[in-house]
Structure formats: C-alpha cells, structure tokens
C-alpha cells in the first residue's frame, strides 16, 4: 500500500513494503528528488537497512552461540509494515518480530518508522523497541537514492557535498571483491566541502567513518538546487552511485558497518553495533529538505 503525505510545500509517498520512502516532490521547484527506478539502474527508491547495514561475512552471523543466516542490508526492506497511525501529514509504520524475522534474528522487537511533515522539512524517525526479556543488538541505516544531477543539463561536475561543520572523515577500505573491511583507513575529508564529478563512483562506493555532522547537503554550484539531510548521531556513512556517469546519488547514514575480513562472526562484536536494554527504545531521526 502507498500512503501520501502532503502540506503546502511538499508531497511525499511512502510504501508499507519496507516502510520505503518513495517520493519527495517540492511544490516550490516542481521537482521530484527521490530516484524513480524507470531506467533499470537501481530498482528501489529509499530502502531501510535493519537489522544491519552493509555486508555480512559468509552471509552468516553468530547470536547466542547459534549460527543464523544474515544478508547484506538486512531483512526489513522485504517485510510488510503495518500502519499504526496515518493522517495527512504523519504516518507511523510498524514491523513487529514474527516467525519470518526470528529466522534471522532471535529477538522480540518492534521496528517503528515514522514520517512527519513539518513545514518544508520531512522528518523520518527510526525506532527499535525492545519487547524481549534481554538486551537486543542491531544496527540501522537508510539508503535513499536521489536524482543527481537534480537539474537536467547539469553534470556531476557541477555538484558538491556540504557538511554543516568541519569534518575529519576517514574512508574505510574494503577488500576488492567482497568489500568487507580490511582495517585500513585513509583520509577522505578534512573540512566541510567535498567536490563531486561524473566519475566520483568509478572506484565503487565510499564507506566512511568518523562522521560527526548534523547535516549533509548535495548541492549544485550551477543552479543552486539542493537536497539536505539531517544525519545527527549516525557515525558511519556509505555513498553509492553508478560509475562512468553520475545519474543517481545515494547518501546512506548508518549506525553500524560492514564486517571486517577477520571477523569472529559474533553479532554483538560487529563494528558500530547498537543495543536496547529491556523495556528501552533506541531512536535516530533523519530529516530531508529540498530546494
């Protein structure tokens, strides 16, 4: 099912399958900013990554001494969420633990995703509610895809990424074929602005650590069009797109990261793993502003 949220500035569409944000349309610019998969380049819009973003070594993990299957970016993107609340400007979608989720993750939980329009801003809140009798461990992430260039006639060379405060971001180097992390790091950004180009993704995605920004903005130096994301308290990020020519730009804030090549496979030991104690709720909020 597709829900539509709307106010005087934005029209937003969200699917119950995967709680996927499918559209952000600005009435002011008369533009769509979320990727619409018509060119068969990426058959999604903005998937959510739970209970893990990134890659899992050997597609298996160990929880409580038992081996469980686990796949890249988790299972939530393929699950049907249930609407707990729906109005013209607010939507709350829940995924409760069930037989299908327990096949991968032996915890009792509710993964709640809420969307709310606040003027020119779309707020997306991710909550993991512990319904178990023990501490539960997980990671969360978002994988929105945006049109880039935003304005037809522009190229990737016309764009930059702006961070709201100076950063000392490290690129986490992955193994060439598996893209599992190698423990090697290299400087990626010292400052606030990262120039883009048509060939930005020629060497594959960028896996980033030590992200300490409140916002990141994909901005055209030529037309001034932009997409601003609030990413406070997401310490990791993946940037992903297609090589040879800029067409889609994915900005993926993550709480968690891919496995190391020498992982012990223990779930609780994964890089950036989060948790919620009994009766507690883990929460992170993303925001979107476009122009």
Image (cartoon, grey):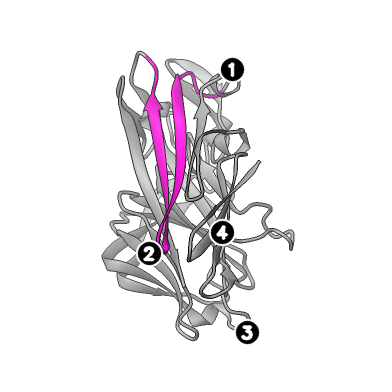
User: Do the residues under discs 2 and 3 have CB atoms within 8 angstroms?
Assistant: no
Q: Magenta region's main secondary structure?
A: strand
**Closer to the N terminus: mark 4 or mark 3?**
4
Q: Residue 160 appears in which quarter of the rendering?
A: bottom left
**Closer to the N terminus: mark 2 or mark 3?**
3
Mark sitting on residue 99: 1
From the top left corner, tell me how far across and down residue 130 is, in percent.
37, 23
Mark sitting on residue 153: 3
**Closer to the N terminus: mark 1 or mark 3?**
1
Q: Residues within 10 Å of mark 1 (few under 14, many from 20)?
A: few
Name the residue beneath numbered marker 4: 145
Identify the element where label 1 is drawn. helix
Asked if one can make out residue 260 in the rendered structure from this viewpoint, the answer is: no
**Closer to the N terminus: mark 4 or mark 1?**
1
Q: CA distance from mark 2 to mark 3?
A: 24 Å
Taking 235 as reference, is 139 left or right?
Answer: right
Identify the element where label 4 is drawn. strand
Magenta stretch, residue numbers: 104-132
Identify the element where label 2 is drawn. strand
Work out whether residue 97 or residue 84 is closer to the camera in this orientation and state it.
84
Q: Residue at x 38, y 64 (%)?
A: 216
Asked if the stretch drawn in magenta spans residue 174, the answer is: no
**Closer to the N terminus: mark 2 or mark 1?**
1
Name the residue beneath numbered marker 2: 216
Identify the element where label 3 is drawn. loop
From the top left corner, tell me how far across and down residue 82 is, in percent.
56, 31
User: Do the residues under discs 4 and 1 have CB atoms within 8 angstroms?
Assistant: no
Vertical order, 211 against 56 (above or below):
below
């Amino acid at each position: 099912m597709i829900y539509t949220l709307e106010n005087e500035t934005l029209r937003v569409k969200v699917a119950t399958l995967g709680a996927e944000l499918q559209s952000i349309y600005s009435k002011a610019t008369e533009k769509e900013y979320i990727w619409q998969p018509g060119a068969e380049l990426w058959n999604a819009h903005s998937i959510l990554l739970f209970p893990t973003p990134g890659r899992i070594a050997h597609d298996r993990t160990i929880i409580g001494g038992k081996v469980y299957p686990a796949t890249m970016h988790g299972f939530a993107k393929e699950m049907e969420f249930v609407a707990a609340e729906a109005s013209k400007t607010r939507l709350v979608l829940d995924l409760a633990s069930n037989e299908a989720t327990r096949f991968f993750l032996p915890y009792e939980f509710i993964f709640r995703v809420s969307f709310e329009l606040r003027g020119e801003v779309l707020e997306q809140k991710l909550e993991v509610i512990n319904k178990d009798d023990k501490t539960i461990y997980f990671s969360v992430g978002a994988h929105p895809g945006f049109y880039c260039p935003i304005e037809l006639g522009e190229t990737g060379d016309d764009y930059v990424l702006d961070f709201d405060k100076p950063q000392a971001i490290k690129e986490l180097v992955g193994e060439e074929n598996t893209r599992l992390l190698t423990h090697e790091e290299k400087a990626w950004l010292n400052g606030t602005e990262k120039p883009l180009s048509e060939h930005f993704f020629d060497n594959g995605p960028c896996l980033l650590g030590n992200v300490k920004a409140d916002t990141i903005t994909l901005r055209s130096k030529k037309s001034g069009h932009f997409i601003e994301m609030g990413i406070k308290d997401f310490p990791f990020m993946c940037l992903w797109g297609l090589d040879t020519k800029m067409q889609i730009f994915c900005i993926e804030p993550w709480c968690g990261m891919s496995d190391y090549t020498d992982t012990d496979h223990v779930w609780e030991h994964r890089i950036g793993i989060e948790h919620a104690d009994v009766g507690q709720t883990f929460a992170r909020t993303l925001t979107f502003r476009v122009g």
